[in-house]
């Protein structure tokens, strides 16, 4: 059995999630439901859960406040939220899981499936390190992204990433120090995550950091020459939006 706790300040949201878990996941045992941070901390200390469904906004506090107060986090977290755009971005960068309210059974099934498939629970410490860093630096360039590699998680500053290169179901991150980090996720999974922080998908096979574009060579689609010496083709259909993005830097 998976010991679980739900922390959310809206009783209706607790009821929906609790009932979905009870009716569809016999191996998830919800030990407690809590409507504020203090009760959540007490329940976590009492029941030592393996999984916590944690709302982001909890009254006048946040789920991040709860995690900070605990210090040593020995459970997995699935965040639940209806909005909070920048906080959600920090969660995505930290490779942590989340559910958007109102969550569907399909979404919940997928999230629990990812929890069960997660082989290296020791990655959690790095993920929370990245999360706390990113929450602190929401409006700054010094955000970190947690990249799942064969050896665990690699934390990389977004400002150090020059480009992403697709290779089927894998993506290689190229950094300004010439490091190459391959992850077993498609480039599509990073496109939406990075588009609001000055990255642009110029081609099916490439996302580039606009800050590292050295110059642009005109052509049918054109070529973006990067500061690391690489020359990246720009697709014809993305050319106009790419040039607009460059001008808006």
Image (spheres, rainbow, N blue to C red):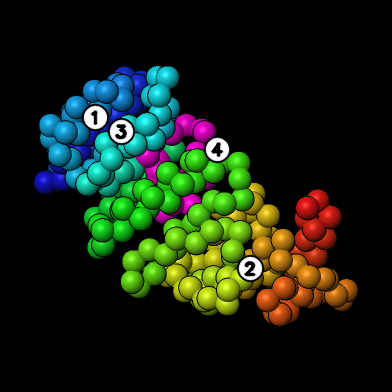
Is 119 covered by the magenta stretch? no
155 sits to left or right of 38: right
Q: Nearer the viewer, residue 132 or 31?
A: 132
Read off the residue under disc 3: 69
> How far, Cα to Cα, is label 2 from label 4?
25 Å
Badge 4 crowding class, 10 Å Cα cut-off, few under 14, some 14 to 19, many 20 or more, is few
Q: In the image, is residue 117 above or below residue 176? A: above
Q: For residue 219, what is the image quadrant? A: bottom right
Please determine whether, in this image, residue 102 is positioned above or below residue 158.
above
Magenta-drawn segment: 79-99
**SS for tag 3?**
helix
Mark nearer the viewer, 3 or 2? 3
Residue at 57% in and 51% down: 142
Q: In which quarter of the image is residue 29?
A: top left
Q: Are marks 3 and 1 in contact (CB under 8 Å)?
A: yes
Mark-to-mark CA distance, 3 and 1? 8 Å
Q: Position of residue 128 (x, y in %)?
A: 36, 48
Do the residues under discs 2 and 4 have CB atoms within 8 angstroms? no
Image coords of residue 1 (percent x, y): 11, 46
> In the image, which disc is placed on residue 85?
4
Which residue corresponds to mark 2? 162
Q: Earlier in the sequence, mark 3 or mark 2?
A: 3
Q: Which of marks 2 and 1 is nearer the N terminus?
A: 1
In front of the other: label 3 or label 4?
Answer: 3
Helix, strand or loop status at disc 2? strand
Residue 41 is marked as 1
Towards the viewer: 69 or 195: 69
Spatial separation of the CA atoms under disc 3 and disc 2 = 36 Å
């Amino acid at each position: 059995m998976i010991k679980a706790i739900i922390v959310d300040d809206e009783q209706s949201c607790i009821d929906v999630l609790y009932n979905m878990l009870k009716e569809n996941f016999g191996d998830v045992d919800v030990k407690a439901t809590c409507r504020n941070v203090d009760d959540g901390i007490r329940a976590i200390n009492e029941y030592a859960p393996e999984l916590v469904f944690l709302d982001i906004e909890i009254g006048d506090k946040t789920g991040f406040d709860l995690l900070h107060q605990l210090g040593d986090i020995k459970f997995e977290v699935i965040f639940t939220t209806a909005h909070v755009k920048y906080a959600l971005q920090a969660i995505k960068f930290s490779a942590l899981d989340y559910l958007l309210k109102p969550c569907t059974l399909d979404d919940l099934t997928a999230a629990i499936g990812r929890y069960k498939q997660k082989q290296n629970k020791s990655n959690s410490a790095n993920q929370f390190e990245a999360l706390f860093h990113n929450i602190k630096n929401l409006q700054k360039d010094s955000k970190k992204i947690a990249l799942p590699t064969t050896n665990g998680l690699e934390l990389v500053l977004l400002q150090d990433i020059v480009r992403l290169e697709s290779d089927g179901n894998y993506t290689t991150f190229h950094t300004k120090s010439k490091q190459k980090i391959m992850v077993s996720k498609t480039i599509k999974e990073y496109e939406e995550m990075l588009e609001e922080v000055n990255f642009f998908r110029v081609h099916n096979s490439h996302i580039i950091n606009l800050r590292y574009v050295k110059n642009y060579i005109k052509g049918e689609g054109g070529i973006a020459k990067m500061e690391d010496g690489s020359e990246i083709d720009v697709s014809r259909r993305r050319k106009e939006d790419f040039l607009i993005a460059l001008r808006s830097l």
